[in-house]
Image: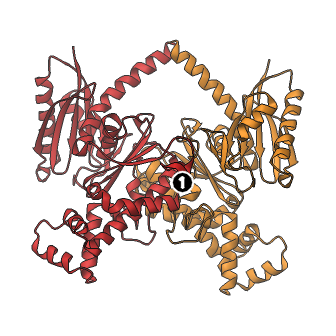
Chain colours: A red, B orange
């Protein structure tokens, strides 16, 4: 009987559910809106209903398990969300236990950025590597660290938050309580803030016009203006690259990973921030200079900094991968104990 | 036949060699000066001679192997030192191959700060934990990351350099090429630089007097003056704690480890920098706040920040531990393959 897993990506806007087989083939994907305003119980109910519907459809196959990516910091000790800005009212509630109770089966809860990292490791930009780190530049800056093919959770599942590396100790306040986090320079929210700052400084008539006339004014529009050569808009993405370069230099010096993957909406501005990013990384990381692609760093494996490949599906694939990894771990453990 | 390992700590000043048994009992320790000025070949010759003498003395026991901690960044691909400020002329030289050729046996080369971390994990402050990070506050700031009981090397052995996390992007220049590294605020060298800056600003008559009269003027003297209440000296250690707090907040948010160990000479000023350190970590790391020791962070495992226990012997014990871990890994691999 063919084996498949169910992956769920529970976002603040959309709820997406996929059935994925062991080789990563997408068997089915459904998307519905997340009616966050109707409250936690309603959303969990809708999700469990959709999971049941998918499982029923594939009842002739073997379900390896269910993985659920959620936008929040998960305390693996308790199965509760510690922080969940996009799911107001979900913090300090036993989310995992409640889903398991309603479905009558075990589920694996994972932070959405960790799921995305695992997806890119399995089927995307880092598929040839066992160790990788992913940065997701969205409304915030999420991250996921994968070591030995598995998400590195740390002691309580709260690891993998490179978006809250301090880039500028006295920089803009971050909702996390810190100041000058990477997230305050490299998220879509940060791009918009920096655009408003440039407008307030009178730096760009083009930005002013666009912000007044374009109802969709946001990071994407600022990027389009950078492409069209607006100086202030270009400076904003130089700043994005500067901050990413500082954060990546820290990560490279600490972890010496073979590959760092950058995804999320702001990664679409890749060409606008990459030059500044590489300049900072070269200047600030001697480990990078010793391992940079190209002749000057000598022989040996190289440090890759690259774009994500799976787009918005990374988290969905990663969530589906979770129960498969658990099954593999169980098999290995069995083999080890009976060796 | 009893089993033991030889650990070597090759410093810029001293060469130390120990015989250690499997339970961590120190069987013998010898210390000689490292005559760095007589050159690489001479020092390697002296070291090999001392290793041979120790092995001869314990010839009735089984030698598990030889581990050597060296002050430099080791490229594990090539067995060469990439950076070695305390061993001038050793960079880009096949150190490991040359030692193995002279001894006629395999040796394990390891960065000295990684060895110290492994020593503290095996027998010191982190002996009850599998995952830990150590910061060594000496002339520079070294570091070692231990995951699953083993040093995390990254792809080429260059991982574990938290001393070069950027704390202040436009801060003092670091020999590594970066600016504002943790090392520029939390090393003995940094304490001395900050003392000279305070003297130049005319902040402390006591510091001026001491720097003129005390031939041993350095980080230790500045600490003694902080203990005696000198405002400028206290401010310097507040700055040490501030920088350590920023670096640790980054590490805690990224790795969520159970324990962070701080050693090296400057750690003797623990009480002078700890309050500022904890203030910054609390403010800057939401992961720390969710896991801080004490009631407010709720149930679950706690994040420990603590002092190293083994002093200058940590690196020596860690070096001896290296061949034992290799032997264990080989046994596990054998069991796995024959399962």
Residue at screen point 51% across, 41% down: A301
Q: Is residue A121 above or below residue B182?
A: above
- Mark 1 nearby-residue class (10 Å; few <14, some 14–19, many ≥20): some
Is A29 on the left or on the right of B257, as rendered? Answer: left
**Position of residue A195 measured from the top left corner of the image (x, y, whole percent):** 25, 72
Which chain letter goes with mark 1?
Answer: A
- Which SS class for mark 1? helix
Quarter of the image holding residue B288?
bottom left
User: Camera-side residue: B258 or B82?
Assistant: B82
Q: Is residue B222 above or below residue B9?
A: below
User: Camera-side residue: B45 or B212?
Assistant: B45
**Position of residue A44 measured from the top left corner of the image (x, y, whole percent):** 17, 41
Considering the image in quadrants, where does the N terminus of chain A appear?
top left
Q: Is residue A224 above or below residue A76?
A: below
Residue at screen point 40% across, 67% down: A180
Residue A300 seen: yes
**Position of residue B134 measured from the top left corner of the image (x, y, whole percent):** 60, 49
Residue A246 seen: no
Is B148 on the left or on the right of B215, as rendered? Answer: left
Residue at screen point 64% across, 30% down: B325
**Position of residue B156 measured from the top left corner of the image (x, y, whole percent):** 56, 41
Residue under numbered circle 1:
A289
């Amino acid at each position: 009987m063919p084996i498949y897993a169910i992956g769920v990506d529970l976002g603040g806007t959309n709820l997406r559910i996929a059935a994925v087989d062991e080789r990563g083939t997408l068997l089915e994907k459904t998307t519905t809106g997340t009616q966050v305003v109707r409250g936690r119980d309603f959303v969990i109910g809708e999700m469990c209903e959709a999971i049941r519907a998918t499982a029923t459809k594939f009842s002739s196959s073997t379900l390896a398990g269910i993985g659920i990516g959620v936008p929040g910091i998960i305390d693996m000790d308790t199965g509760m969300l510690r922080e969940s800005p996009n799911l107001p009212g979900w913090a300090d509630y036993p989310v995992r236990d409640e889903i398991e109770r309603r479905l009558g089966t075990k589920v694996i809860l994972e932070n959405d950025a960790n799921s995305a990292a695992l997806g890119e490791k399995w089927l995307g930009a880092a598929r040839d590597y066992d160790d990788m780190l992913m940065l997701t530049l969205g409304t915030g800056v999420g991250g996921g660290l994968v070591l030995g093919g598995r998400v590195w959770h740390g002691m309580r599942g709260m690891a993998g938050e490179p978006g809250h590396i301090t880039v500028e100790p006295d920089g803009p306040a971050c909702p996390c309580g810190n100041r000058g986090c990477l997230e305050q320079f490299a998220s879509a929210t940060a791009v918009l803030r920096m655009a408003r700052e440039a407008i307030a400084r009178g730096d760009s008539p083009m930005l002013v016009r666009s912000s007044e006339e374009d109802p969709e004014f946001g990071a994407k529009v600022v990027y389009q203006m950078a492409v069209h050569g607006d100086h202030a808009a270009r400076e904003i993405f130089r700043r994005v690259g500067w901050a990413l370069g500082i954060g990546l230099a820290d990560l490279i010096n600490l972890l010496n990973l073979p590959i760092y993957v950058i995804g999320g909406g702001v990664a679409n501005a890749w060409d606008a921030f990459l030059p500044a990013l590489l300049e900072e990384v070269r200047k600030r990381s001697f480990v990078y200079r010793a391992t940079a692609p190209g002749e000057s760093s000598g022989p040996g494996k190289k440090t890759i900094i690259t774009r994500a490949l799976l787009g918005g599906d990374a988290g969905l694939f990663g969530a589906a991968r979770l129960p498969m990894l658990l099954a593999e771990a169980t098999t290995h453990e069995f083999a080890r104990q009976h060796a």
